[in-house]
Image (cartoon, rainbow, N blue to C red):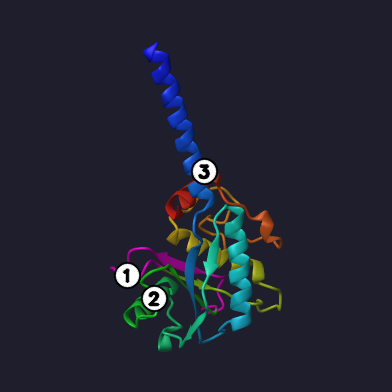
Amino acid sequence: TNYTKDKTRIMKLSLLFAASLLSSVAMADPVKVQPIRFLGPDAPTRAYVRAVLDGMEDKFAEAGIEVDALRIKTHLNPWKDETNLSNINQAFRKQEGWSVRRGYANPYVPTLALTGRAQGLYLYGFANRTVCYGRCNGFAVAAIAETNAAGETRYPQSVVAATHELGHLLGAQHVNEYPNIMHADAMRYVPTVISNYPWAQSTVAIMQWRTR
């Protein structure tokens, strides 16, 4: 009957659409990111920044997202005499605005600035997808450190800080689950083994949708 033929045709079209969708997901281009290393107090070395970026790429791979950090650019510390601001969030905002005005932010791909610790506080970050007003494709700052005052490694915390802030630029929001990459206090309590720090499935779905 015509009904049976139509139903068969719809099923075939649905299967073709599903196959096409899976193919497009599998062939998705990597998410390119422009990293910036800021000089200044406790500035990270270029080698350490690259190691953190490698760890960040691995964490996104766990979420099924291929991230490609481009060549690291190095610029002078934009905080100048403002590194001792009591309002650390204001310091990050000034760093972000300074970078956009100077043209350091990439107009085509998300920009991730990696800087030293501020005032010896726990690792911190700031991300904004709208501040650039067409002059960049989202800007995030993450404070990273090789060790703390006691000489203990802060590599896991640094990777989480960078991953967390880039996650915001890819559409991820804070979640209540803990431990979790996108928890609001993710950088404060990080386990020694980074692989034990998961993504929420809802976060993965949002980022995959935004990056396809």
Going from N to C along the chain, the mark reached first, 3 or 1, is 3
Label 3 crowd bin: few (<14), some (14–19), many (20+), radius 10 Å: few
Q: Are marks 2 and 3 in contact (CB under 8 Å)?
A: no
Q: Which residue is mark 2?
A: 105
Q: Nearer the viewer, mark 2 or mark 3?
A: 3
| Residue 56 place in picture, x, y as percent | 59, 65
Residue 121 seen in render: yes
SS category of the residue bearing label 1: loop
Q: Are marks 2 and 1 in contact (CB under 8 Å)?
A: yes
SS category of the residue bearing label 3: helix
Q: Which mark is residue 132?
A: 1
| Residue 196 colored in magenta in the image | no
Bounds of the magenta span? Answer: 117-138
Horizontal side of residue 132 vs 4, given as left or right: left
In the rendered structure, which amino acid carries the disc numbered 3?
A: Leu
Label 2 crowd bin: few (<14), some (14–19), many (20+), radius 10 Å: many
Horizontal side of residue 63 vs 103, given as left or right: right
